[in-house]
Image (tube, grey):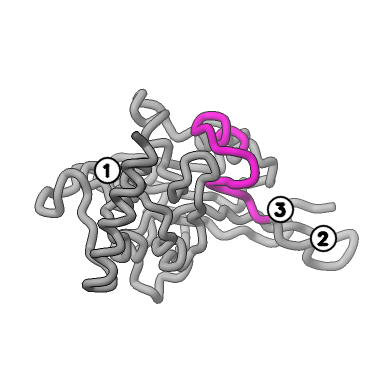
Amino acid sequence: MKNSRRLFLKSACALVVGASGYTVAQGPLGEAQQTTKKYALIHDETKCIGCDACSVACREVNNVPEGVTRLRIERKGPYGEYPEQYFRFTRHSCQHCEDTPCVKVCPTGAAYKDEATGIVSVDAWKCVGCQYCIAACPYQVRFINPVTKAADKCDFCKETRLKEGKLPACVSACPTQALTFGDLQDPDSQVVQVLKHTPNYRTKTELGTRPKLFRIGSQDGEVRL
């Protein structure tokens, strides 16, 4: 059944691409419906110690195969002169953009933004592995899952932890509370309060993607050797 489905979708994909290059995909709730929530994540680089507890928890909860990852912590450094050396740790994962390049190029509707949550997601059943979304993502965070053969990435644990009313696995696993998750549409949420009162930044904002992964910039000398 799975192979037949893929063959069918690949044939349909070929017809669509041949006719127009790509189509604009729509989420399962339709573009006419308004977002009820707008989930976002803050990575506080001043608290992150690069322990990788977040990526380990993500892999376990979401059954991410070895060899690929939905998120990783990039370690940069050391900076400075001994003994005043330090590292910086930054998060590499889906940015859950407001303006989604990956969704725009998907010919089957497999890539979509969930209008109920604002989360950018992938419907593995619809994905034909064309990799258009991977090429279009300016943050280079998508990959082909070697088990499902479909595009994959962070979805804020939408199909696992969020369904159970829990925080994303990475947030719960962080030992230093470097991650804050919440609804940008709720003025009383912790994520909104942190963004209001703490200087923060986002990457590649000049592209107009309006990412919902915010960062609190690291300061010199947090982690010393």
Q: Which residue is mark 1?
A: 117
List the single residue furthest toward the left.
Answer: 32
Image quadrant where one finds the N terminus: top left
Foreground mark, 1 or 2, reads 1
Disc 1, disc 3: CB below 8 Å?
no
Three-letter amino acid code of the residue under disc 2: Gln
Q: Which residues are magenta?
A: 56-74
Residue 24 vs 121, above or below: the answer is below
Q: Is residue 146 left or right of residue 99?
A: right
Q: CA distance from mark 1 to mark 3?
A: 34 Å
Secondary structure found at label 3:
loop
Q: Position of residue 134 (x, y in %)?
A: 45, 61
Disc 2, disc 3: CB below 8 Å?
no
Tell me the crowding category of disc 2: few under 14, some 14 to 19, or many 20 or more residues within 10 angstroms, Cα based.
some
Residue 111 vs 146, above or below: the answer is below
Tell me the crowding category of disc 3: few under 14, some 14 to 19, or many 20 or more residues within 10 angstroms, Cα based.
some
Residue 59 vs 221, above or below: the answer is above
Say the numbered circle drawn on residue 85: 2
* Of callouts 2 and 3, the N-terminal one: 2
Q: Is residue 105 magenta?
A: no
**Pick the front one: 48 or 66:** 66
Q: Residue at x 86, y 67 (%)?
A: 81
* Of callouts 1 and 3, the N-terminal one: 1
Q: Position of residue 53 (x, y in %)?
A: 63, 36
List the single residue furthest toward the top.
Answer: 164
* Of callouts 1 and 2, the N-terminal one: 2
Q: Which residue is mark 3?
A: 222
